[in-house]
Amino acid sequence: MVRVKVCGVSRVESVAMLDGLVDYIGFVSSKRVSSPRVLPPSHIRDLASHARTSAAVAVLHGYSPGEAARVAFSSGVEVLQYHSPIDPLEAVRLSQVLEQYGLSLALVIEWTEKVWRPMDPCMYWRVLKSEGVRLEYLLLDAAKGSGAPLPLRMAARAAGCIPRLGLAGGLTPASACEAASTGAFLLDVSRGVESGVPGAKDPGLVAWFVYSARRCSAAL
């Protein structure tokens, strides 16, 4: 059964609504981007403390790997999603640091319309596996500002070689079924389950997304 992550959560009431309904709750902090969904690390800690069943994820962008590890540890989350493409050597080092902190690592590969960054997803997974790195998931996402949607046909190919593959990039309840049909381990949604204030998740849209994703993944 496909897992679901709701990202960009910025309100306590959204955490309470999502806890136990989805598998992961993502809290975003960035040193480069400003948005209602982007939080200071101290706010992440406050919100993550309300996630008692779902795994809390610190989605960190614009931090160095070392900074990100320290922020994630101090935020009290279970998973660090390092949301900047890094080469395998950096990934190995970050994984080793997080092991000392007792945290899991998730990484991202970006689609830039023509190429994957930092490299082909299947190759990246194989290299990390050969180095003994265990990822919580490897997330495929469209590069910010590229205007390029994530090609689901290529995502399906990646799902064939990556058992813990995540998909992000403009997902909505209407597209959740098709995305789940790729065989991905995880679907990651943010704006697609909002109907008003950025960061405030709509219970009806969340329920629709979860239902569609799990129904279609169960049929595989």
Image (tube, rainbow, N blue to C red):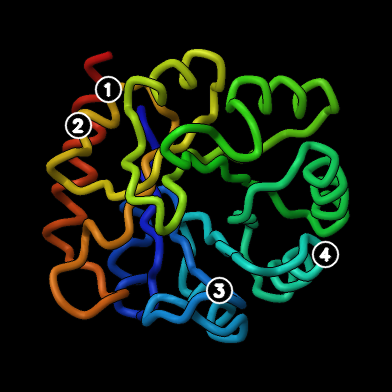
Q: Residue at x 61, y 86 (%)?
A: 42
Q: Residue at x 62, y 65 (%)?
A: 77
Q: Which mark is residue 151?
A: none
Note whether 184 is above or below 118 in the view shown.
above
Q: CA distance from mark 3 to mark 2?
A: 29 Å
Residue labelled with disc 4: 66
From the top left corner, tell me how far across and down residue 104 is, in percent: 69, 48
Residue labelled with disc 2: 177
Q: Residue at x 27, y 22 (%)?
A: 181
Q: Nearer the viewer, mark 4 or mark 2?
A: 4
Q: How many marks?
A: 4
From the top left corner, tell me how far across and down residue 113 is, in percent: 41, 38
User: Amino acid type of disc 4?
Assistant: Gly
Q: Quadrant of residue 25?
A: bottom left
Q: CA distance from mark 1 to mark 2?
A: 6 Å
Q: Quadrant of residue 40?
A: bottom right
Q: Residues within 10 Å of mark 3 (few under 14, many from 20)?
A: many
From the top left corner, tell me how far across and down residue 109 is, in percent: 56, 40
User: Amino acid type of disc 2?
Assistant: Cys
